[in-house]
Amino acid sequence: MPIQRVGVVGAGTMGNGIAHVFARSGFNVTLCDVEQRFLDRGLDAISKNLEREASKGKITADDKAASLKRITAVTDRSKLAACDFVVEAATEKLEIKTEIFRDLDKVCRPEVVLSSNTSSISITKLAALTKRPDKVIGMHFFNPVPVMKLVEVIRGLATSQETFQTVRDLALKLEKTPIEVNDAPGFVSNRVLMPLLNEAMYTVMEGVATPEAVDEVFKLGMAHPMGPLTLADFIGLDVCLDIMRILQDGLGDPKYRPCPLLIKMVDAGWLGKKSGRGFYKYSQ
Ligand SMILES: NC(=O)c1ccc[n+]([C@@H]2O[C@H](COP(=O)([O-])OP(=O)(O)OC[C@H]3O[C@@H](n4cnc5c(N)ncnc54)[C@H](O)[C@@H]3O)[C@@H](O)[C@H]2O)c1
């Protein structure tokens, strides 16, 4: 079945980036969120990001206009019935994704592949909510989606080879690099990245170094574009804590114990850049 129309559920940071790259690559996109204001915010972000690409000469002004025209924004999820492929990029809460996957299974044609951009929820669990577990898969994009090359493609226990191939081919059409990973807590990206950020937080908590010094070590010594504490602030300290807890629960190894300083900062409402304060202060 040729994929012409792609459904994207959730128009937030990731959903609008995913809609952007599909539309830019010539796919029609149905972008779905729970309220019109979230769709308006998402469309506004897409427009600004396409404009930035046009100003850098990556696309033409006509490409921008054509990409925007290919996106239809809806609050009525039944409109996703017309889609040939769906990426779910809604809020990272199991109960939200459970409701969405059960409903998508009813709304979408039986042959349609349902993918999730989840950072940490089990693909096998999401697949088991549907009558098509062989057609459920992880398609994990990275932020900012129009820029980052990687797509982690996560096979659930029941994901078929055909489904894997469909997502791999789609990622290549988006000019991304798909990397195959099996379903496990944190997949590869967060399983390796989050303990690094967590350990950096321990060094600050134990007075080994200041946040600035830790970040400089990684920038200058390991050629990381930003240090681990800046990155944690950008990701959101609440998101980092949630993922550490998923690693701790799912893998059961004490090495995944969230740093007590991280827990304390989240309790204080210091969530990083989005709240104006994390390891650093940000003007809002
Ligand atoms: N932010 C990142 O860096 C990043 C990176 C990779 C993966 N992810 C994953 O992507 C997903 C989305 O994250 P985000 O950062 O874009 O979150 P976000 O908070 O920016 O956006 C989530 C959007 O989902 C919408 N939503 C909530 N419930 C919905 C429903 N029932 N139907 C439709 N839309 C609904 C919200 O209104 C919101 O617009 C999560 O699963 C997250 O783990 C995030």
Image (spheres, grey):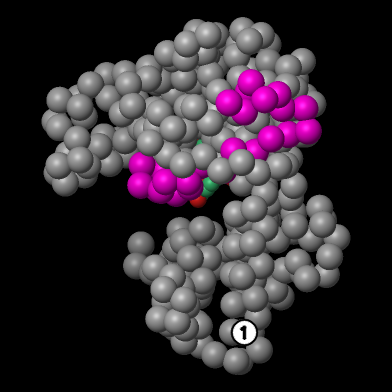
Disc 1 crowd rating (10 Å Cα; few below 14, some 14-19, many 20+) is some
Residue 146 location (% of width, % of height): 36, 42
Q: Is residue 176 magenta?
A: no
Front residue of this view, candidates 216 and 161: 161
Specify whether 168 is left or right of 54.
right
Query: Which quadrant of the rendered structure holds the C terminus?
Result: bottom left
- Report the image quarter containing ligand 1: top right
Query: x%, y% of residue 206?
Result: 66, 89
**Is 119 displayed left or right of 122 in the figure?**
left
Q: Residue at x 49, y 27 (%)?
A: 169
Visible in this render: residue 132? yes
Q: Nearer the viewer, residue 135 or 55?
A: 135
For the residue pair 179 and 233, the one nearer the viewer reads as 179
* Residue extending farthest right: 252
Query: Which image quadrant for residue 88?
Result: top right
Q: CB at mark 1 closer than 8 A to ligand 1?
A: no
- Coordinates of residue 144 in the picture (x, y in percent): 40, 48
At 51% from the left and 88% from the top, the residue drawn is 210
Q: Does the stretch in magenta take in 159?
A: yes
Residue stretch in magenta: 141-165
Q: Amino acid at mark 1?
A: Thr
User: Is 226 on the left-hand or right-hand side of 59?
Assistant: right
Look at the picture and state if 72 lies above or below 220. above
Residue annotated with mark 1 = 203
